[in-house]
Image (spheres, helix red, strand yellow):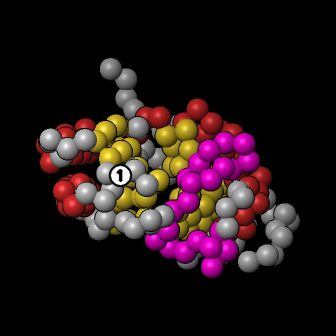
Amino acid sequence: MSDAVSALQGARYEGFARIEEAGLRGMVTLRGDLGSAKLKKAVSAVAGVKFPGRRGAVLDGDNGLCWMSPDELLLLCSYEAVADTVALLEEALNGTHFLAADVSDARVVFRVAGVDAREVIAKLSPADVSPEGLQPGECRRTRLSQVPAAVWMRDETTFEVICFRSVARYVFDLLKSAARPGSEVGHF
């Protein structure tokens, strides 16, 4: 069996914002009735964080829950804990209609950090990432140029971006280009 490696093996770029691959991250797509009290309780207990509201992202270190759609969450955990996390979900939700799928090796997470991080994301996405449109603790599914992605804010100056692993290099290069010194627009 081969060792797991991240898509771009920790690629980094320092521009007017820092772009970096976040490394291996445990990710579980969870589909089900997000209004179910049983599901909410079980998922929050397994994730170790509060259940998010619509378009919410509740994060604590490696652990988190991001609202993806009316019937879908993304559960974040350490890469090493993902198999146990799926098993705990299956046990806690036994008898409930749901789907929990480990998507860790199919996705990649990038971090965009710095006081001008919003500008980097705004150049590539049609989503409103202004301070009024996206705040820490919120998540948006969107596109970055031509590829589907999701973005959420860890804090006022740090975004995390998730996309398919198959387009990791393309997305990294997009982010890198958008953060190139001298390309600042100064909108935010």
Q: Position of residue 184 (x, y in %)?
A: 82, 68
Q: Is residue 102 left or right of residue 87?
A: right
User: Could one spot residue 111 in this view of the protein?
Assistant: no
Q: Is residue 110 magenta?
A: no
Residue at image point 72% right, 42% down: 146
Q: Position of residue 55 (x, y in %)?
A: 48, 64
Residue at image point 31% right, 39% down: 99
Residue at image point 74% right, 48% down: 145
The crowd level at tag 1 (other Cα within 10 Å; few <14, some 14-19, many 20+) is many
Front one among 2 and 67: 67
Q: Residue tagged by mark 1?
A: 75
Q: Amino acid at mark 1?
A: Leu
Say which quadrant the C terminus sits in: bottom right
Magenta residues (range): 129-150
Q: Is residue 58 left or right of residue 182?
A: left
4 to 117, vertically: above or below: above
171 to 52, vertically: above or below: above
